[in-house]
Amino acid sequence: MSDEIFQRVKNGEPSDLYFGDVKLDNGNVVKGVLFPREIAESNHKDISNFGGWRAYIASLKK
């Protein structure tokens, strides 16, 4: 991704989100958009059991 596109993405994110390293199950490390754990665990529903955001949103429409 170009620096210009990266900056547009970054500027469009909510202020609590930040970019950081994410370690995958296979051991690879990639960059990702993260949300502070202490905020997520105190104020938001854990949707891990849905397998992802899209599946969670789909479950709300049922």
Image: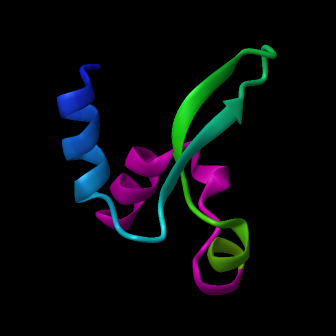
Instruction: Provide residue 1's location: percent of width, then percent of height.
Output: 29, 19
Most distant residue in the front direction:
3
Residue 45 in the image: above or below residue 36: below
Q: In this view, does 53 lie to the left or right of 21?
A: left
Residue nearer the viewer, 15 or 38: 15
Identify the residue at horizontal 66%, vertical 35% (top origin): 21
From which residue to which does the magenta span run? Answer: 42-62
Q: Main SS of the magenta segment?
A: helix
Q: Where's residue 31, x and y in %?
A: 55, 30
Give yes or no for residue 23 being in the magenta stretch. no
Q: Which residue is drawn at 44% across and 50% down?
A: 53
Q: In this view, does 34 lie above or below 43?
A: above
Q: In which quarter of the image is residue 14?
A: bottom left
Q: Which x, y percent locates residue 16?
A: 48, 70
Please say whether residue 52 is one of the residues in the magenta stretch: yes
Outermost residue, bottom side: 43
Figure coloring: rainbow
Number of numbered discs: 0
Asked whether 36 or 59 is in front, the reply is 36
Residue beneath the point at 73% across and 76% down:
38
Instruction: Give the left or right position of residue 22, taking residue 52 as reference.
Output: right
User: Between residues 2 and 31, which one lies in front from this camera angle?
Assistant: 2
What residue do we see at 18% from left, 31% from top?
Answer: 4
- Quadrant of image for the C terminus: bottom left
57 vs 12, left or right, is right
